[in-house]
Image (cartoon, grey):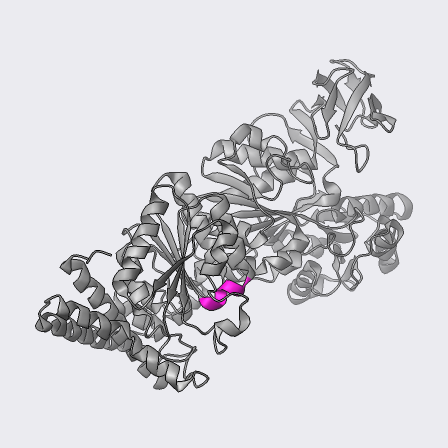
Amino acid sequence: MPEVPQSVALELYRKMTEIRLFEKRAYDLFMQNLVKGTTHLGTGQEAIAAGVSQAMNDDDYTFTTYRGHNHVLARGTPMTPVMAELLGRENGLMHGKGGSMHLLDTSRGILGAYAIIGAQLVIANGSAFSARYRGTRQVTVTFLGDGATNIGAFHEALNFAAVYKLPVIFICENNKYMEYTPIGAVTAVPRPAADRAASYGLEPVVVDGNDVEAVYHTAAAAIGKARDGGGPSLIEALTYRHGGHSRADPGKYRPAEEVKEWLAKDPIPAYRAVLLSRGVDEAVLDGIDKSAREAVDKATEEAKAGPEPRIELAETNVWADGGHAWRN
Amino acid sequence: MPRMGETVDSGTVNEWFKQVGDQVAEGEPLLEIGTDKVDTEVPAPASGTLAEIRVQEGETVPVATVLAVIKLQNGGVVSVITYREAAARGIAQEMRRDPDVIFLGEDIAAAGGVFKATVGLLEEFGPRRVIDTPISEQAILGAATGAAMTGLRPIAEIMFSDFFAVCWDLVANEMAKIRYMSDGQLTLPLVIRCANGAGVRFGAQHSQSVENWAMAVPGLKVVAPSNPRDVIGLLAAAVRDPDPVIFFEHKALYATKGEVPDSGEVTGELGRASVLRSGGDATILALAAMVPRAQAAAQRLSADHGIEATVIDVRSLVPLDTRTILGSVAETGRLFTVEENPRLCGWGAEIVSIVAEEAFGALSGPAIRITTPHIPLPAADRLEDHLLPSVDRITETVRKALD
């Protein structure tokens, strides 16, 4: 595959770095009980979020999962409202009403993070249908985990998308574990997404999900095809979750050798090495790292400084009229 | 063209007993229809002047075709159409009005719907807007949800309301909550139509009344029309509403008929109950297929026992017209609900609780719920009829309570 232009390369590096540092901070804040409920981090999987979003147009649609901080940040949503949402503050993306698992930012085409496995896949078909109906050439991208390939909605969504040749891309982040259980132990085929593609008349596409440029090129090809009326694609991106499934799960069910092997394939140092080998000045990369650290610090401070939501927000926006009345 | 038997899809007009311009009285023989099984006289559904005969003698037409137009004595031109025709007409009215309205579901396009309630829509609006889907209820509702959040106003059909059980995530977790979770970033103007209810001997998995499933989820509006006029009017209101509406058609009512204005838009309003009969002795609330039973019971109570009941078609469970209900209870002092759903947590339970809290002083006796017992529905005619609230049971329950 061709090298990407240096401006794009630096953007990919910046996105991955920012996401990594943001999620590390989210983890720390969770351990301090400032982030409540639960969080699902994508640490180690940043190359997929960065590579895919880089291949999208600004008005394309993204659907993601409860492990979706990364996909939202990658589309350009500022860190502060995301962090504030995690902290349950009024300056949060949804004013504290969504939380970590339900990030949504229509201003960047992010039509939601869905916490019931598989729901986003069938809903993504709807925005794809709508875009084609309205003739806008927008493409919809939806992420899923490997575990989602065993739920009914996945199969309904793939068949539906293929039957109507919808402009939608399904990107399976195969991090080898459905939650705590290895995906291979509960799946009838070795490649949970790619080996199902033929059932829906689609090509099996597998990409190294820790190679950000490979992800970018693969996504760009699928998105271009969809935009030109070529129908849906299903991409399986192989990656690894550095942490556990959620919250403070240490992920001890994973063999130490396996963890070690994948930590060595961490996409961010790997890409840094690639960029250095292409002659990018190390000071440029250090500058990106420094800016990212500062951005995360700033977002943390702004989120912490945000007020708790006004109590009346608990009772607004059930209905489109802004209220929640169910009787006269 | 009425459905002359469960397996009969068409009928032939053998003879018109009246001519255009004749006065006809409700119930008087109007024409004879023949099928391959039987020849039957069909009575006039309303009194008035026979304004138009649309199907001539010897012609064979599908079930639900308009055969004639009767001009009512009060002057307005109305057609008498079936509940199933009303569904198709309501959808067509909204699709003509708004190009962003699309319609998708299983067997709804080429086949015209398994209940023939969507006949003609594919022909008028084409496959771009009227879409036959696979048997994939999650995919259907997912597509409707995603389309609604990006500018369209989808109508999705779930063939039998019982099938909500296989796609309830989309209904209860997704479309109902997305607006709230996003604090208003997204709006979901969509309608899910379904065939609800018993009375056609389909057994426990195709006969349930599940309005209360939807009613229990914040973020869903819930309506259930009892007659063709309301099918069109409430469907129009549902399509134009900016929030998700679950639209419960009653499968036992599809063949029933009612008067509908022949021209112009028919519209309605969510959250408005309909007072069908006024009487000072009791308030009887009913929904969907229980409405005609409640009306028949009220007539019998009046004729046989001198009891005058108010009958209210609740129509809209969310939003709920508590003003009309509480106002009537204040006048009558007695409340009865007629619910097709199994006993526990039916819609009437919520209304009785509201009345107990807010109109306790007006009650002169206990509020009484007349429901299907808390039992799945059996298939055999005799068994199903035994469990559903009947005109006899409603009449007797009210009579005894007022003794």
Does the magenta run of residues contain B359? Answer: no
Tell me which corner region of the image, top left, top right, bottom left or bottom right, holds residue A90: bottom left
- Give the camera-side residue of A302 and A161: A161
From the image, give the main secondary structure of the stretch colored magenta.
helix
Q: Residue at point 52% right, 34% down?
A: B127
The answer to whether B229 is drawn above or below residue B244 in the figure is: above
- Give the camera-side residue of B158 and B222: B158
Q: Residue at point 40% right, 41% down?
A: A132
Image location of residue A2, percent across then percent down: 21, 56
B30 left or right, relative to A260: right
Q: Quadrant of the C terminus of chain A?
A: bottom right
The answer to whether B389 is drawn above or below residue A227 in the figure is: below
The answer to whether B223 is drawn above or below residue B56 in the figure is: below
Image location of residue B264, percent across then percent down: 56, 27
The answer to whether B237 is drawn above or below residue B351 in the figure is: above
Image location of residue A206, percent across then percent down: 38, 61
A124 left or right, relative to B333: left
Q: Residue at point 75% right, 44% down?
A: B252
Q: Which residues are magenta?
A: A146-151
Image location of residue A186, percent across then percent down: 54, 71
Q: Residue furthest right?
A: B304
Q: Quadrant of the N terminus of chain A?
A: bottom left
Tell me which corner region of the image, top left, top right, bottom left or bottom right, holds residue B20: top right
